[in-house]
Amino acid sequence: MNKEQLIEEVAKSSGFSKKNAEKAVTHVLDSIFEALKQGEEVKLVGFGRFNVRTREARMGRSRKTGERVELPAGKVPVFTAGVTLKKALN
């Protein structure tokens, strides 16, 4: 499912117009994005948890040449599925 399909599903299930559903979905995603940028954790009970982890610098290999290259340290977003989501999938 992509963002457009999600918007259509929200509009259909909530009775919102497609324009209002798009605003709602966009606002939720932007809120998650901003919280993660500020280093906050986002918990959606039953669905999962979004947070940011710091990855240390490390050595890797270039896919094209096979040469060893240094990969810089950085932050990466992480999603951990909640118990309810895991149960629904199994």
Image: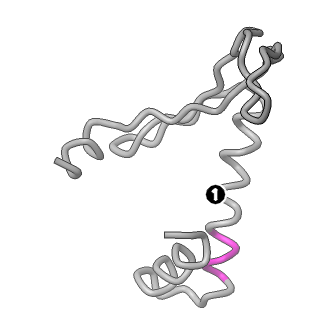
What x and y, as percent, mark residue 17?
A: 59, 90
- For the residue pair 73 and 8, the one nearer the viewer reads as 73
Residue 15 position (above or below residue 43) = below
Q: Main secondary structure of the magenta part?
A: helix
Q: Which residue is mark 1?
A: 28
Task: Name which quarter of the figure residue 77 lies in.
Answer: top right
Residue drawn 71% across the image and 37% down it: 35
Residue 68 position (above or below residue 89) = above
Disc 1 marks a residue whose amino acid type is Val
Task: Name which quarter of the figure residue 4 lies in.
Answer: bottom right
Residue 85 position (above or below residue 12) = above
- For the residue pair 10 and 87, the one nearer the viewer reads as 87
- For the residue pair 70 and 79, the one nearer the viewer reads as 70
What x and y, as percent, mark residue 78?
A: 57, 31
- Indicate whether residue 48 is drawn in magenta: no
Q: Secondary structure at mark 1?
A: helix
Residue drawn 26% across the image and 42% down it: 86
Label 1: how many residues lie within 10 Å, few (<14), some (14-19) or many (20+)?
few
- Indicate whether residue 23 is drawn in magenta: yes
Residue 80 position (above or below residue 56) = below
Residue drawn 71% across the image and 17% down it: 60
Does residue 44 appear left or right of residue 39 in this picture? left
What x and y, as percent, mark residue 25?
A: 62, 67
Magenta span covers which residues? 20-24
Residue drawn 19% across the image and 44% down it: 87
